[in-house]
Amino acid sequence: MADKKQNNKRRNNNNMDDDFNPKFRKIRKKVCVLCSDKNFDLDYKNGDQLKKFINDKGKILPRRATGACAKHQRAITLAVKRARHIAILPYTQD
């Protein structure tokens, strides 16, 4: 019986609070870059600016990764697609 209690104490991390669970930690909500900075103008002709919104394979990052609101995520998608069409951004990265 005493061995079971010692095993339970070893399993629990005493450095953490009792109600702390790393699976359900609060993640801070990202703020839309385009909403917060009024001087930030999204332009499909500026490839360096659009590279922040695509990953290393050339895919458009989702809202949860960019932190953009729905309105601006649609604008980002449209700008990236236009930039791909006129060959400013590649469709895929090799």
Image (cartoon, helix red, strand yellow):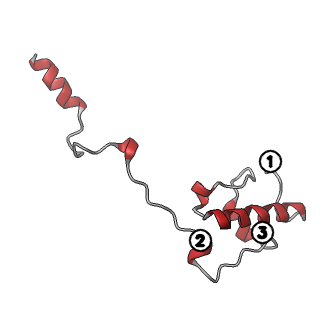
Residue 47's disc number: 3
**Which marked residue is nearer to the observer: mark 3 or mark 1?**
3
The residue shown at (59%, 71%) is: 33
The residue shown at (66%, 66%) is: 71
Q: Is residue 23 left or right of residue 83?
A: left
Residue 94's disc number: 1
Q: Residue furthest left?
A: 2
Q: Is residue 50 left or right of residue 67?
A: right
Q: Residues within 10 Å of mark 3 (few under 14, many from 20)?
A: some
Which amino acid lies under the numbered mark 3 shown in the image of this protein? Gly
- Residue 38, given in percent of the width and then of the height, sits at 61, 82
**N-terminal label among 3 and 1:** 3
Q: Is residue 85 left or right of residue 12?
A: right
Asked if 58 appears above or below 8 in the picture, the reply is below
Per the model, the C-alpha gap separating discs 3 and 1 is 18 Å
Per the model, the C-alpha gap separating discs 1 and 2 is 29 Å
Which amino acid lies under the numbered mark 2 shown in the image of this protein? Val
State the residue in front, 66 or 12: 66
Q: Give the quadrant of the N terminus.
A: top left
Disc 1 element: loop
State the residue in front, 12 or 80: 80
Which amino acid lies under the numbered mark 1 shown in the image of this protein? Asp
Label 2 belongs to which residue?
A: 33
Residue 85 occupies which quadrant of the picture? bottom right
- Residue 21, given in percent of the width and then of the height, sits at 32, 42
Residue 13 occupies which quadrant of the picture? top left
- Residue 8, given in percent of the width and then of the height, sits at 19, 27
**Which marked residue is nearer to the observer: mark 2 or mark 3?**
2
- Residue 15, given in percent of the width and then of the height, sits at 22, 45
The residue shown at (75%, 53%) is: 58
